[in-house]
Amino acid sequence: MSPHTAKNILLSTFRASVPVVGLSKSWTKAGALYSLQPDYSDVGRQCGEMALRILEGATTSSMLPEYPEKVTYSLNSRTAEYMKMEFPEKLLKGADEVY
């Protein structure tokens, strides 16, 4: 997705008061209501653990897919205000970033 495409998506949904879930913090900063981001350091740790299991003899076909264990989120309070929405205080405090 290009920056031009993202801008058009955010503008059209913002004008229609339809909240968008962003793909990253930059989307949230640009106007998405919120976004979820994996903790990439933790994903690296998970990959290392999987590699160790393979080195110890596990086959890749015997391993189940793993999902990020740690996820952070960012919120856009200005977008929420425009759309007449409110984030609970607990949600605001837990956010990685609030714009």
Image (cartoon, rainbow, N blue to C red):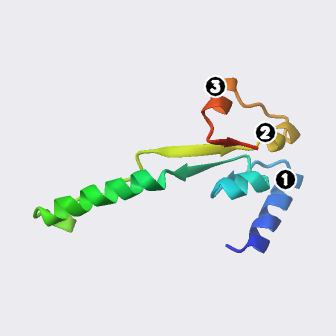
Residue under the image location 60 percent in, 33 percent down: 94
Residue mark closest to the camera, 3 vs 1:
3
Q: Which mark is residue 75?
A: none
70 sits to left or right of 54: right
- Residue 14: assigned label: 1
Q: Residues within 10 Å of mark 3 (few under 14, many from 20)?
A: few
Which residue is pictured at 44% across the width and 54% down the height?
A: 41
Residue 52, horizontal then vertical, whole percent: 20, 60
Which label belongs to residue 77?
2
Task: Name the amino acid type tagged 2.
Answer: Ser
Q: Which element is circle 1 on?
A: helix
Q: Earlier in the sequence, mark 1 or mark 2?
A: 1
Q: Residue at x 87, y 41 (%)?
A: 82
Q: CA distance from mark 3 to mark 1?
A: 25 Å
Three-letter code, disc 3: Lys
Horizontal and vertical percent position of residue 83 = 84, 40
Q: Quick one: 41 or 65, which is closer to the camera?
A: 41
How packed mark 1 is, by other alpha carbons closer than 10 Å (few <14, some 14-19, many 20 or more), is some
Numbered tag placed on residue 90 in the rendering: 3
